[in-house]
Image: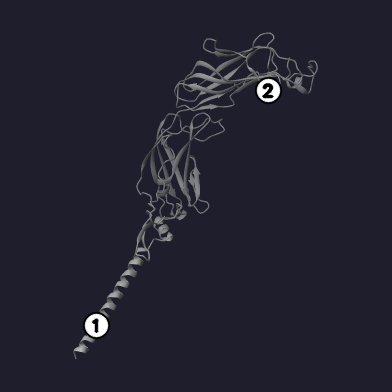
């Protein structure tokens, strides 16, 4: 009897051992499975798509200046951080390795998700400065992979390529400026250095919700421009002795501006120094005295062109002031000219404005064809007043 009891006890101990071993094995497998789970790329993409912050449903107010123009809110995405996992090897030594989250492209808002409120929240305003220094407004937004661009006078936007159509309204206090009737560009514009309180609005043209959704904007425009160009009416035929020219400066800003220095490049071809030096003179128009007399006889010969001499970076210290919204000519003269009569070498003199310095650091400078040039063509034969072709007929012959 005792032998049977001992045998049964032995069998029971083995069964318990098997059960414990099986439990331990199950727990070990579960631990391995638990430590090797990592999010799949598709899970990450889904989580990013789910974190698109919806547009606000209340109106907002935004301050816009030339420094912040075009920085209105856009759709914000907040992707999850990359996760980590513990990997158990066969030797039961645990090592930590980071799982790199896949690069995820920011999804575009589908056209069906566009609402008037979304447009109000996600429209960006930027400025394009015109040739006269004033500002033109440009509105943009991006949706469905497409850029929508429109201006202040557009009554509708969208309505094509699957994008819903919306009515657009824009108003400002003070009102925008209207170009004169003879201007080729009739787009309304913002004045320089002016503060505006504006409102943009959007309304769907179809569907159940066609209410106007609007946003207030506080806009401060920047300075005007300083534009430089040669005079429209200038005699460019090179003559002996004296030649008159200059640069026209146009101040499109509401503040006075003073030009303190010019940087010039000079060149001449086919001119003789036998009868004296040639002088480039920059004239103060207030009293007709010279700001600078630059003698050109020491200019270096240019090996590229025959009978050509050049000088670069010639500086003229001046004190030339323009009032607000004004235009003025800075006279430049070429004195002591004596042309050579070598056929095939046409005399000329060129003055190019490379740079200038002013007392206003915030005013942009526009150099529009900043060059003045006098020239003539050496004719073959004597002067013919009845010529129908050639330099005499065209009025460009040296005489």
The residue wearing badge 2 is 303
Quadrant of the drawing holding the C terminus: top right
Decide which of 22, 101 is in the foreground and name it. Answer: 22
Q: Is residue 106 left or right of residue 397?
A: left
Decide which of 160, 309 is in the foreground and name it. Answer: 309
Q: In what element is the residue under mark 2? A: loop
Q: Which residue sits furthest bottom?
A: 1
Decide which of 88, 142 is in the foreground and name it. Answer: 88
Task: Give how far across and how far down residue 13 sits, in percent.
Answer: 24, 80
- Local packing at callout 1 (Cα closer than 10 Å; few below 14, some 14-19, many 20+) is few
The residue wearing badge 1 is 12
| Rendered residue at 33%/67% (across/down) | 31
Q: Is residue 181 left or right of residue 8?
A: right
* Vertical comparison of 278 with 77: above or below: above
C-alpha gap between disc 1 and disc 2:
112 Å
Can residue 349 be spotted in the picture?
no
């Amino acid at each position: 009897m005792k032998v049977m009891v001992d045998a049964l006890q032995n069998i029971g101990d083995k069964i318990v051992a098997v059960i414990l071993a099986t439990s331990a094995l199950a727990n070990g497998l579960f631990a391995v499975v638990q430590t090797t789970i990592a999010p799949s790329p598709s899970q990450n993409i889904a989580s990013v798509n789910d974190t698109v912050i919806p547009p606000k449903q209340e109106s907002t107010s935004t301050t816009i200046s030339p420094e912040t123009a075009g920085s209105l809110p856009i759709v914000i995405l907040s992707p999850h951080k990359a996760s980590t996992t513990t990997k158990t090897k066969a030797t039961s030594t645990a090592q930590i390795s980071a799982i790199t989250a896949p690069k995820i492209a920011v999804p575009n808002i589908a056209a069906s998700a566009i609402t008037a409120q979304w447009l109000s929240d996600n429209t960006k305003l930027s400025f394009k400065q015109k040739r006269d220094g004033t500002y033109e407004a440009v509105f943009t937004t991006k949706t469905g992979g497409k850029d929508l661009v429109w201006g202040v006078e557009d009554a509708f936007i969208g309505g094509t390529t699957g994008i819903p159509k919306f009515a657009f309204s824009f108003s400002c206090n003070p009102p925008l400026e209207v170009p004169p009737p003879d201007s080729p560009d009739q787009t309304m514009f913002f004045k320089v250095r002016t503060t505006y309180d504006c409102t943009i609005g959007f309304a769907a043209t179809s569907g159940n919700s066609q209410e106007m959704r609007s946003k207030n904007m506080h806009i401060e425009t920047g300075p005007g421009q300083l534009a430089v160009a040669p005079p429209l009416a200038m005699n460019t035929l090179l003559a002996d002795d004296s030649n008159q020219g200059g640069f026209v400066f146009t101040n499109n800003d509401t503040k006075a501006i003073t030009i303190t220095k010019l940087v010039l490049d000079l060149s001449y071809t086919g001119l003789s120094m036998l009868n004296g030096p040639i002088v480039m003179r920059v004239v103060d128009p207030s009293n007709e005295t010279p700001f600078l007399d630059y003698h050109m006889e020491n200019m270096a010969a240019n090996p590229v062109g025959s009978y050509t001499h050049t000088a670069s970076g010639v500086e003229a210290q001046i004190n030339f002031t323009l009032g607000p919204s004004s235009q003025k000519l800075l006279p430049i003269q070429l004195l002591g000219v004596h042309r050579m009569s070598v056929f095939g070498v046409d005399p000329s003199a060129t003055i190019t404005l490379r740079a200038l310095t002013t007392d206003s650091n915030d005013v942009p400078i526009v150099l529009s064809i900043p060059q003045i040039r006098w020239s003539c063509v050496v004719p073959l034969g004597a002067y013919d007043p009845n010529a129908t072709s050639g330099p005499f007929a065209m009025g460009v012959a040296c005489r």
